[in-house]
Image: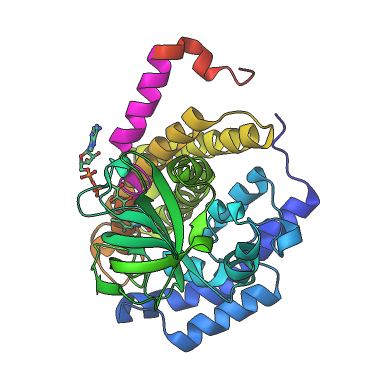
């Protein structure tokens, strides 16, 4: 394992970071105050990022993406953690890996426009009665002469107001689950309310209802009955990147703010950073952020070697998300009243951090995955050559 960065990687990080600092961070407080990203601003950052080649960087070059390795992607995602969710979505895109299973006409209709940024996709798996138990969904698709008839509902679907189509999981047999690409505007498909959240202001999370929606055969992604496997496999890398690496980036960013504040805030005629109890909070944060970062790099390196990194990604998901929670909590403490005050961004980071332990599989679900593998395979779990 060699994690030294090439000059190309350094330049990539620098370009992404500059775009975030100059184009996105200035919009953060407006999004926070308005609760949404202004349409004109959304279009402006979207087209500027596309023109700079920063959109859909996770997609292969032959489709118009940047063809990043998993490790390079993690380096970018760490930077994405330095700004708000909705700004990342509009500027850099959120092109889900399962779409790479598109074949034939699906490539021109759904995959390529999504990579180009002319269409946007959300992923719709969760239902009011099926969250952690993603296989317990009630949404069903029945085969008919014209394709499939879809019935059911989803909720908490991120960015669903903006999206043009949805990657929807549905039962196609007693236990079989398939994935379908469902376009907004089809008869019987309605978008419900925006479910207001504690954080992630600006990103809508919506309900979807399907009432006898007629889907074409071409809407089926991959093979019938293989949808669950397909989605879960492809979403593993999404979990590492969009949750693990972003949590590392957010923790790092907050840590930088803590350090600056501890170096300049004076009480009792001395910098608060001189107090050992403040130093301990900084030291613990540095240790944990670096540990989470190396875990994420290691898991990405494993994926790039073609190794099975499922358990490692589960570990990153738990550790990076929980590190973020601890770091933002310490940040509020070190900033004192200003940490709780909306004049600074610390309170926003505190609210936004909480979801990292819940979405993309809760900490409890991932701990279960790690424990079961460890009990079955023992110490081999930690052998990268397995
Ligand atoms: C802001 C936000 C954005 C989201 N975006 C999307 C999206 O774009 N698309 C999408 O499909 N979904 C999305 N989700 C859904 C998200 O993935 C689920 O909320 C998550 O998987 C947990 O499911 P749940 O909320 O139903 O909780 P539940 O599954 O009801 O869990 C409740 C509690 O029980 C615990 N629990 C459940 N099962 C077990 C078990 N076997 N062992 C131990 N503990 C257990 C959980 O850990 C948790 O603490 C989003 C959710 C939020 C809040």
Q: What residue do we see at 72% from left, 32% from top?
A: 2
Q: Nearer the viewer, residue 102 or 289?
A: 102
Q: Is residue 4 visible?
A: yes
Task: Reply above or below: 96 against 315.
Answer: below
Residue nearest the viewer, comparing 156 with 103? 103
The N terminus, quarter of image: top right
Left or right: where does residue 378 sit relative to residue 353?
right
Looking at the image, residue 366 sits to the left or right of residue 83; the answer is left
Residue found farthest to the front: 145
User: Looking at the image, which residue is at 37% across and 48% down?
Assistant: 172
Magenta highlight on residue 37: no
Q: Report the coloring of the rendering.
A: rainbow
- The image quadrant that residue 296 belongs to is top right
State the extent of the magenta-drawn residues as a range. Answer: 356-375
Residue 102's quadrant in the figure? Answer: bottom right
Magenta region, mostly helix, strand or loop?
helix
State whether residue 84 appears in this view. no
Horizontally, residue 159 falls left or right of residue 347, namely right
Identify the residue shown where x is 55% and y is 71%: 91
Q: Quadrant of the C terminus?
A: top right
- The image position of residue 58, as x and y in percent, is 63, 55
């Amino acid at each position: 394992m060699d994690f030294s960065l090439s000059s190309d990687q350094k330049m990539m990080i620098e370009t992404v970071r500059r775009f975030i600092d100059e184009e996105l961070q200035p919009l953060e407080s407006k999004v926070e105050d308005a609760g949404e990203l202004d349409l004109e601003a959304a279009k402006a950052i979207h087209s500027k990022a596309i023109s700079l080649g920063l959109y859909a960087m996770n997609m292969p070059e032959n489709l118009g993406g940047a063809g990043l390795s998993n490790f390079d992607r993690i380096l970018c995602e760490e930077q994405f953690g330095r700004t708000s969710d909705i700004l990342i979505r509009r500027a850099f895109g959120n092109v889900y890996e399962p779409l790479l299973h598109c074949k034939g006409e699906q490539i021109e209709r759904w995959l390529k426009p999504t990579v180009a940024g002319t269409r946007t996709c959300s992923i719709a798996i969760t239902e009011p009665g099926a969250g952690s138990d993603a296989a317990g969904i009630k949404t069903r698709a029945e085969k008919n002469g014209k394709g499939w008839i879809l019935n059911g509902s989803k909720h908490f679907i991120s960015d669903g107001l903006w999206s043009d189509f949805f990657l929807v999981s549905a039962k196609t047999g007693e236990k079989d689950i398939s994935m379908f690409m469902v376009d907004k505007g089809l008869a019987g498909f309605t978008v419900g309310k925006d479910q207001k959240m504690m954080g992630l202001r600006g990103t809508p999370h919506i309900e979807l209802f399907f009432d006898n929606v007629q889907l074409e055969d071409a809407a089926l992604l991959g093979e019938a009955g293989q949808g669950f496997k397909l989605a879960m496999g492809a979403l593993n890398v999404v979990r590492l990147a969009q949750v693990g690496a972003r949590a590392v980036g957010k923790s790092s960013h907050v840590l930088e703010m803590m350090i600056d504040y501890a170096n300049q805030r004076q009480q009792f005629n001395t910098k608060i950073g001189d107090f050992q109890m403040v130093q301990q909070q900084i030291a613990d944060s540095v240790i944990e952020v670096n540990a989470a970062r190396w875990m994420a790099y290691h898991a990405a390196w494993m994926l790039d070697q073609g190794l099975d990194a499922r358990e490692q990604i589960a570990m990153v998901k738990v550790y990076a998300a929980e590190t973020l929670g601890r770091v933002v909590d310490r940040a509020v403490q070190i900033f004192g009243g200003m940490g709780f005050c909306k004049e600074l961004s610390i309170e926003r980071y505190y609210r936004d951090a909480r979801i990292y332990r819940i979405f993309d599989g809760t900490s409890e679900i991932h701990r279960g995955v790690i424990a079961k593998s460890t009990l079955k395979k023992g110490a081999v779990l930690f052998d990268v050559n397995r």
